[in-house]
Amino acid sequence: MTEELVAIVKRECPTCELVAPVLREIAAGRRLTVYTQDDPTFPEGIADLRHDETLECSHRLKVETVPTLFRLEEGREVARAEGWHRGDWESVSGVARLGIELPESRPGCGALNVEPGMPERLALRFGDLALKARTIEVSDWEDPIEAAYDRGWTDGLPVVPPTDLRIARMLAGTSRKPDEVIGLIPPNLAECTVEKVAINAVMAGCRPDYFPVVLTVIEAALMPAFAMHGLLCTLHFAGPVVLVNGPVAKRIGMNWAGNALGQGNRANATIGRALQLLIRNVGGGRPQEIDRAILGNPGKYTFCFAEDETDPDWTPLSVARGFAPSASTVTLFHGEGVSGLSDQKSRTPEELTRSLAMALWRVTHPKSASDASGGAMLVLSPNHHDIYKAEGWSRADIEAALWEALKRPASEVARGVGGVPVGVDPALGDALVDKFGRENFLLVRAGGRGGLMSAIIGGWTGQRNAKEIQVVTKEITG
Amino acid sequence: MIRNEPYLMRDPTAETAPTMRERVPPPADLKAATIGLLCISKERSEEFLDRVEMRLAEHGLNVLRFAKPTHTKPAPVNVIQDIVERCDVVVEGLAD
């Protein structure tokens, strides 16, 4: 059996300097190859000293720390010692009483091949990662950002050019294989791989740590219940609205506080945009083509935010929908733009409930009821929530009260009332009608403090067909 | 971000279209189209385009004339925008 010892070192590392005499001790009696990551002359006095200039050897041996001493049999690793620890080095090398002048142990330094961005570079160079998407060459004189516009890849804002290195870094954000098919993207039902999602996530400006969220958003959008195809084709304003719940929101730095529904947070902005770019680029869903929106809404660039879960008295939406508090989830709602409600006067839960219900009746049309209305996502700000909290009201209490307050006698909103033809069947008389289908009414807590206001995100009229079209929630698993 | 070497990107689409961009298809019928004639301001460009305009007018087609100040520089943005706003097709005229 061929047995050999291999050490990886760099001169820049004080521990490597420290073990240089030990390496000479080993080399005196054993077959030892030393690969140096930086200075090709370091360490002196080693017969088989090689410069790992491309870092291929370090990469293939999956070195994380220098110095690392390996014992290989038939070229395969059977043992390794990282940093300097006399016992470990003696056991790996099979040489007793090593470095008796040295301290018992010293930690090593980070290896060059695992410096930030380097593993992906090496994976591309040495063929561990073979991207399948075809290459588009941009000529010497073209600006890559303009080239992306010219090819119709953008939503109107510039995109980050999807180079191999950026894609590789994005893919490092997930353990899933680049060629795994995650579904068929409407409207063209084009097969979509993890790699294609990564390319579009790069273009949207995502960081690799957002990528598991992006993948889950895509998977949620592809759940048949969500009816993404219908949503992107609709004449209506609505597009996908993404709500993120659970620990991931804090881990990736999402905004659920001031201006949560506005601009300025990279994760909020780019996760929602990645979904839209994917639908455009892989699915082929473009405005004035299959996207038939009469007016659309600015949220169709991107619409993604997190729920404020910092109040222990508040039950997050994901938990109300049956997920564990420790689970990170995405919830996709078919939503139009944001409509604000300022109510600085209500002081009791009952007053505020009536006030919110009044504003919610505006969704779709002030006289449309559940047979014709889309649902709504009510984003309750912390100051408005305080009014409920002061009286001990839970999420369930607020929802139940709102649900009652949203009932109106049909006669108030019947066809013709107020000289407006829109409305419910006059034959219903004074029977109470609901504004929304129950499953399409969502309550979320988010926003900053300092003002008594909340936001209403109106739903899609398609939601009235609750059997076919539903809000979806999916856990982020990585 | 103009670079001096080819820049490689990966295709974000379903790859159903060719990598080379396609030309805009010509209009099926020029009768309803407005044809722009862009003079590049080279020697005798105007004379050349006068002749082109005359031939197009003989067919009853709508023609508008444009010019860029010098053939030595790309057309100014306002000239390009004028053409985009008012024309369906454009003929760019050279001469000498």
Image (cartoon, coloured by chain):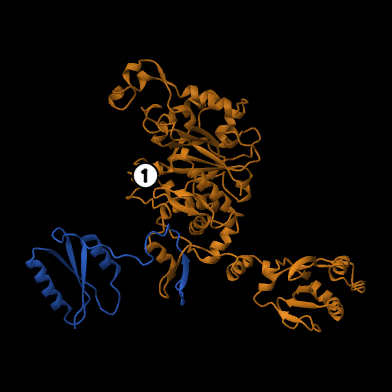
Say which of B11 and A340 sits in front: B11
The residue type indicated by label 1 comes to Cys
Say which of B52 and A430 sits in front: B52
| Location of residue A133 with respect to A192 vertically, above or below | below
Residue at (39% x, 56% y) in the render: A156
**Quadrant in which residue A433 is drawn:** top left
**Label 1 environment density (alpha carbons within 10 Å; few <14, some 14–19, many ≥20):** many
Residue at (43% x, 75% y) in the render: A140
Residue A375 percent coordinates (x, y): 44, 33
Residue at (15% x, 58% y) in the render: B32
From the rendered image, report the letter of the chain displayed in orange.
A
- Which residue in the protein does label 1 denote? A233
Residue B92 percent coordinates (x, y): 22, 72
Residue that sits furthest to the top in the current view:
A430
Q: Is residue B29 left or right of residue A1?
A: left
Residue that sits furthest to the front in the current view:
A1
| Location of residue A160 with respect to A74 vertically, above or below | above
| Location of residue A435 with respect to A462 vertically, above or below | above
Callout 1: helix, strand or loop? helix
Q: Is residue B47 left or right of residue A426?
A: left
| Residue A259 seen in render | no
Residue A353 percent coordinates (x, y): 51, 26
Residue A43 percent coordinates (x, y): 79, 80
| Residue A202 seen in render | yes
**Quadrant in which residue A309 is drawn:** top right
From the rendered image, report the letter of the chain displayed in blue.
B
Say which of A271 and A404 sits in front: A271
